[in-house]
Amino acid sequence: MGELQVEVLGHASVRFGIGGKTIYADPYSEVHDFAGNPAADLILITHNHYDHYDEKAYGKIQTPQTKFIVSQNVGHVDGRYTVLANDEYCFWEGIGIFAAEAYNINRRNPQGELFHPRGVGNGYVLDFDGFKVYLAGDTEPIPEMQDLPRIDLAFLPKNLPYTMTDEEFIKAANQLKPKFLYAYHYFEIDVPALRAKLDPSIALLN
């Protein structure tokens, strides 16, 4: 399929380029100015929280031909939108796209509600002709991660109170053992401390 280009734009926003196509995940205008960025062929949305489903951001990169793959709580907005529930799969331009589970087990708001209930949001596994990229979305370490295929490049969230502690991030990464790893969706990060506890086979690219 050609060389995969990856650019982390901030928070949970990532841009991929491959074969002349541009894919964005969770574009978010508060961390990146999308004006003048390459037009989106595909936009992935993990869930409907404002820092993931941001009309101000995707409005600057969408065209009438842009396709969206979204979670159930975003829903079917128009004919360009494909809604994937957890564990559903589709293809786009020869790229396999699997909607992985992404949810909280312990993290709750002051009202006692889980920030991300099970079955609402998605992570995504993108299969670029055998090279698999995992965008975990907003999640804690969950049992379903053990059922994922071999991952080459993973993006795992690392921030409280919404997703993972440093220790949980390390645990999840060491279970997945991707070749390459990014921490994303974080407020602060100590890269040397994380690298010291990761399996030596994992390259943390932050």
Image: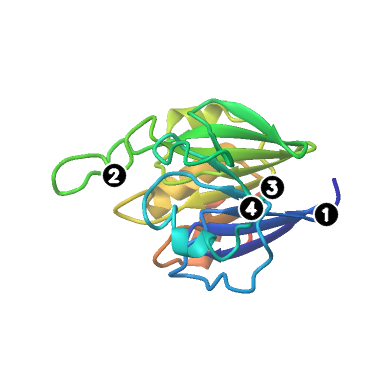
Q: Secondary structure at mark 3?
A: loop
Q: Which residue is mark 1?
A: 3
Residue 149 versus residue 55: which sits nearer the camera?
55
Q: Amino acid at mark 2?
A: Phe
Please say if the residues under marks 2 and 1 sit with CB atoms less than 8 Å apart. no
Q: Which residue is mark 4?
A: 64
> Which residue is painted at 61% across and 28% down in the image?
89
Which quadrant of the view contains residue 176? top right
Which mark is nearer the camera, 3 or 1? Answer: 1
Q: Earlier in the sequence, mark 1 or mark 4?
A: 1
Measure the alpha-carbon separation of dots 2 and 3.
30 Å
Q: Earlier in the sequence, mark 2 or mark 4?
A: 4
Mark linked to residue 179: 3
Which mark is nearer the camera, 2 or 3? Answer: 2
> Which residue is painted at 59% across and 58% down in the image?
14
Mark linked to residue 115: 2
Please say if the residues under marks 4 and 3 sit with CB atoms less than 8 Å apart. no
Residue 59 versus residue 54: which sits nearer the camera?
59
Q: In the orientation shown, which residue stands out farthest toward the left?
A: 111
Query: Is 108 positioned to the left or the right of 134 in the image?
Result: left
- Classed neighbour count for the residue bearing mark 2: other residues with Cα under 10 Å, few (<14), some (14–19), many (≥20): some
Which quadrant of the view contains residue 147? top right
Which mark is nearer the camera, 1 or 4? Answer: 4
Q: Earlier in the sequence, mark 2 or mark 3?
A: 2
Measure the alpha-carbon separation of dots 4 and 3.
36 Å
> Which residue is painted at 52% across and 31% down in the image?
84
The percent position of residue 34, horizontal first and vertical second, equals: 56, 69
Q: Earlier in the sequence, mark 2 or mark 1?
A: 1
Which mark is nearer the camera, 4 or 3? Answer: 4
Q: Amino acid at mark 4?
A: Pro
